Amino acid sequence: MVPPAPPSAGPRAGDVSSGVGIPGVSGKFPLGVMERSSPSLGKAPPGAAEPSLDGLRRQAAVAISQELSRLACHSTGPSTWIHQVRRRSSLLSSRLEEKPFSEMEMSYIKQGEEALQKSLSILEDREGWKTETVVNNGDKVLSKVLPDVGKVFRLEVVVDQPLDRVYGELVDKMEQMGDWNPSVKEVKILQKIGKDTVITHEKAAATPGNIVGPRDFVSVRCSKRRGSTCVLAGMATKYGAMPEQEGFIRAENGPTCMVLRPLAGSPAQTKLTWLLSIDLKGWLPKSIINQVLSQTQVDFANHLRERLAGPVARSC
């Protein structure tokens, strides 16, 4: 967290006093600019209601944008910085108009961020991982026991498809996963919150021989894309509109995540790392749980490859 700036001791020589600062640009715009462009920004007449803070911010953004346009028209030199500042003030205006998130929505966003940060911290610690499975094609599953989480599994594979193709299948077409992954019966998005967060309900198919009966999950999922790396994280949550379902045991995810990045030296291939942490609930021996979860990851990689090798399916 950046510490607050110390109180100003007053304007220094060369400063523009009583001005309005603009992010990303040194110096300030004189308050007189705003007064000329928008007289209503002055103090309210006696007896009149004071304008709201949001209203003043909108008026300020409009006034600054108008003044920047005037300066750009009369300037004989480069005006790139003016356009940059104007764009920022336009963004400020649009953000002020955005519908704010409710308290409940903010709690879901924070849960998604928490799942992402916790998952990445687990993956970044390279110590203590034990090999569970190694496949001939190089796919491998590792495991590790964490004091506050339990046993987690880590799948590492390379997919012969570019990152955008893999990302699109796992995120944009999330609800189609039941079409190609036999371990999943259905994935349904219950609510979208902003650009990065969704609440989902997932029904898992029973394992062969019904060793593990039908489970379902309610999760908050967070997707982040930074440059050439994508992270899809999630964890169990509560959602009032999706109570426990008859015929299913409500299991819990989390923290879990998938990390996608282009394979070094081969951008047409994608390195996929999947951290899996699940509490299946019920009365299951740990040996069975460990076997089922590690095999689920290996099977997932194979089914994903088959899906990506086929024709591109349009998302609904």
Image (cartoon, helix red, strand yellow):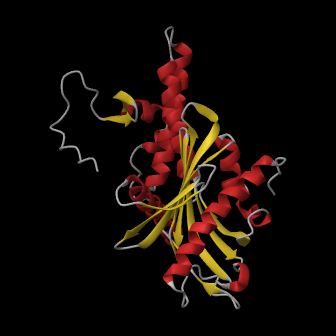
Q: Residue at x 83, y 51 (%)?
A: 313
| Residue 148 location (% of width, % of height) | 36, 74
Classify residue 238 as left or right of residue 180: left
Nearer the observer, 191 or 138? 138
User: Can residue 285 be seen in the rendering of this structure?
Assistant: yes
Q: Residue at x 44, y 35 (%)?
A: 34
Q: Quadrant of residue 293?
A: bottom right
**109 or 268: which is nearer to us?**
268
Up-down relation of residue 51 to residue 89 (above or below): below
Q: Nearer the viewer, residue 192 or 250?
A: 250
Q: Residue shown at 67%/63% (left/top)?
A: 299
For the C terminus, the image quarter is bottom right
46 with respect to 180 (left or right):
left
Kindly give the residue lying farthest to the top in the view shown. 76
Q: Residue at x 63, y 61 (%)?
A: 298
Find the residue positioned furthest to the front.
Answer: 136
**Residue 236: image x %, image y %?**
53, 74
